[in-house]
Amino acid sequence: MKKTLILLTALLALAISAKAQQSYSGQQLTEEGAWCWFADPRAIHYTNADGSINASYIGYIDVHGNVKAMQLDHNTGLRTEVLVRSYFQPDDHNNPSFLVLPDERVLIIYSRHTDEPAFYYRVSKRPGDISALGEEKCIVTNHNTTYPSPFLMSDDPEHFYLCWRGLGWHPTIARLTLPDAEDNVQIAWGPYQMVQSTGARPYAKYYSNGKDKLYMTYTTGHPDNEWPNWLYFNVINLHAEKQPDGTVNVAPTLEDIKGNHLSVIADGKFRVNKSAEYKQTYPYTLVDAPTNSRAWVWQIACDTEGLPAIAMVRIDRSKNQHQYYYAKWTGEAWRLTDLANGGGRFHPSNTEYCYSGGEALDPANPNVIYLSIPTKDRSGKSIHEIWRYTLNHQGQVAMKEQITRNSEKNNVRPFVLPGSEHSPLRLLWMHGDYAYWIVKKGYPTGFPTAIHAHLPEQWAPCHEASKATKGAFTVDLHMELPADHYHGTMLTTQSFSYGLDKESVKPYVEMGGNRYYSTNQLYTSDNWATNCTGTHGDNWPTPHATLRITFTYDGNVLTVYRNGLIDQVIEARKLKASQAATGDIPFGSIEVQSYDRCLSQEEIQALNK
């Protein structure tokens, strides 16, 4: 019996050792994608009451300036990747965020990083399905816009609220009407700058109770510039009141965590600083007031009792030591838990020393936090790996579990999808060789990362097969385009043609006497790598030297793919692709391949490999 126990113990030890030697860096969802951690939700999960919609939506931007979104339909298992906007500022601050509207359409909103007074957004044409998006719309402001965070509130069901870094480079809020039949929105209240700091650029994260309050936590400024850097917390109370005519009036105020009134937001900014006098006067606006470190914030969420928790980091004077912390409001005070040493900056560049690997709270259970921690692999090399920490009700770390291991590249900026507690897809992160937050001279590679996910071993997106229904077809064009004649017709068929407009540089499908223009210009942002010097309003249009355009038709819908991404979706009947011929553009070379079936996106993307 004793020998048997020794043998079993030895086998168990071998199994544990073997697992420790295995490599795991998650499942790759997209090869090119990145995000910052302030525009949120950068991904969400939504399931409606009858279960007909059960999908995850993920947003990111790539180094070519493509703002992209992915949809994973958990009812069908299908994965869809969409080109939301081409030729955008190639900057990881510009990842899109999502809002599921009351009619279950999905709003995708994004902006450039600081150098344009505008937000852009697109709304899905169908409930719960972002594969077909409406035209791009613009919300014009009179100040720079970065980090959009949208919210719906049940006490004010005819509007949505948008928070961002805007007026004076400070936390800003506005109330907007819901998109109308043409997807237009109007600013109904605001924008208003909520606070004024002694720091130049406070960094804020937001959370909502979904009813009548928003929670905001923010820093004195950027930790690069502030020593020390404090962390504050405010409640935005909407005070929404329904009128006899059915309209809702709002008069939002700013409060501390105890409910003490600080300001009427529309009347002026609440001023914060890091003095002893401020700390004594407004103690319940402070989460952390360190004397010898730079606080920075990663996320905020509330537990089932409505008590907020904050994922934060303290960075030392040299910026080489990042210590992860967990702050939890107990009802009387903020309790800080020292979690783990996050090392220094996760990237090799000699800049942005305050970029930690990252933290993420599970919004369904804020006692669970995911950390990107430098971890030695089997060869002794240090790589940022994803860990899961679970805290008990006393704020102590009760369990640690390593998620990724022996990765070849860093795993950073984890994120848990809100609403995903009953979904197999919960945890995402960036994986790769990140160098800098924008593609520019000096950092031409920018942020060449992929988006990875932690998924059950038995679950994977299904492989959609070609559709061989009657009348279905695919036409695939792989071409070299001349820079000096970048317009004209690319393809003609019996039923439709495809061309490039000279003035707008937007491609179009022409059929039945109508032209259907793409929202997206036929440019990339690759010239930023040799011309851009920063966020100065740069625009460096780069024509595609090579391009793959694929048309699929399933008998009802014509879908146009640009380099494997859905660009246009047009309902049409009785189309035929016979007599397909190239147009009048003097191509450097062109290959045309036709299929008598509707290829799946997976098959189309395989053509681009």
Image: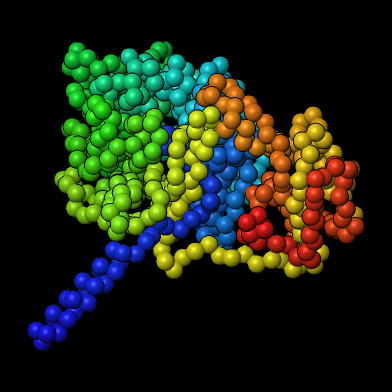
Task: Pick the quarter of the image with the C terminus.
Answer: bottom right
Residue 186 seen: no
Residue drawn at x 39%, y 21% is: 201
Residue drawn at x 46%, y 27% is: 164
Place of residue 372 in the rendered image (x, y in percent of width and height, measured from the top left): 33, 46
Place of residue 178 in the rendered image (x, y in percent of width and height, measured from the top left): 58, 33
Residue drawn at x 65%, y 67% is: 465
Question: Left or right of 367: which side holds 276?
Answer: left
Residue drawn at x 17%, y 81% is: 7
| Quarter residue 8 falls in | bottom left
In this rendering, is residue 408 above or below 252?
A: below
For the view shown, which residue lies furthest in the bottom direction? 1
Considering depth in this image, is 396 or 431 the residue closer to the camera?
431
In this rendering, is residue 186 above or below 375?
A: above
Considering depth in this image, is 64 or 116 the residue closer to the camera?
64
Circle count:
0
| Quarter residue 285 falls in | top left
In this rendering, is residue 118 above or below 401?
A: above
Place of residue 431 in the rendered image (x, y in percent of width and height, measured from the top left): 44, 49
